[in-house]
Amino acid sequence: MDLEVLRILEKDARLSAAQLAAMTGKSEAEVAATVAAAEKAGVIRSYRTRIDWEKAGAGRVYAFIDVAAQPERGTGYDRIAERIYRYPEVHSVYLVSGSQDLRVVVEGKTMQEVANFVAEKLATIDGVRGTATHFLLKKYKDDGDIFGETPTDERLAVTP
């Protein structure tokens, strides 16, 4: 697998095979084959647009919810994590070390909506022993993107 192509694509999924070829010194066919193989193997999981919802005027509320869970024989935390990640409100679920077992990122329109999700859905799952909710107050940097700045286009100009 060509990691250089994947690293570049991870930062900007809009790049064409021609642009990637120019940036890496590989042929367009090689780059296209790399991308196709990565998509087929599930290495490339999806292509997404990261949106600053605050700037778009449609702010959202995010909360990090630490969950204490009782692991099950044979499946550990997998069954509980699966029950949690199936809810559409759930953005991410991680198994973590420390005093809690799972970290869940939940998205809602209001703090009350997130609070209701925790009280009515998350806390009532068999095996969940407790939760601690931390609301996100301000996002400075997310997945490598600095929020509050207008991103500059760092793509290389490609001339035919």
Image: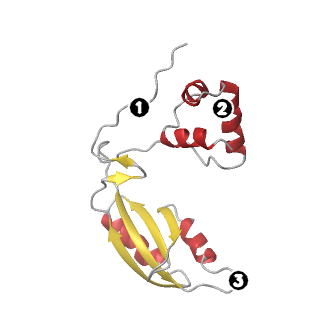
- Residue 125 screen position, x and y as percent: 53, 80
Closer to the chain start, of discs 3 and 2, is 2
Q: Nearer the viewer, residue 135 or 126?
A: 135
Per the image, label 1 sits on a secondary structure element best described as loop
- Looking at the image, residue 143 sits to the left or right of residue 31; the answer is left
Instruction: State which tag comes first along the sequence, 1 or 2.
Output: 2
Q: Which residue is mark 3?
A: 74
| Residue located at (31% from left, 51% from top) | 59
Query: Residue sitting at 54 percent across and 71 percent down?
Result: 84
* Alpha carbons under labels 1 and 2: distance apart: 19 Å
Q: Which corner quadrant of the image does residue 71 belong to?
A: bottom right
Three-letter code for the amino acid on which mark 3 is drawn: Gly
Q: Which residue lies under the disc numbered 2? A: 31
Using a 10 Å C-alpha cutoff, classify the residue at mark 1 as few (fewer than 14 neighbours), some (14 to 19) or many (20 or more): few
* Above or below for 95 versus 59: below
Q: Among all residues in the image, which is located at the extreme front?
A: 25
Find disc 1 in the rendering and name its residue: 154
Three-letter amino acid code at disc 1?
Glu
The first of marks 1 and 3 along the sequence is 3
In this rendering, position of residue 118 left or right of residue 160? left
Q: Which element is circle 2 on? A: helix
Corner quadrant of residue 111? bottom left
The Cα–Cα distance between marks 1 and 3, rounded to whole angstroms, is 48 Å
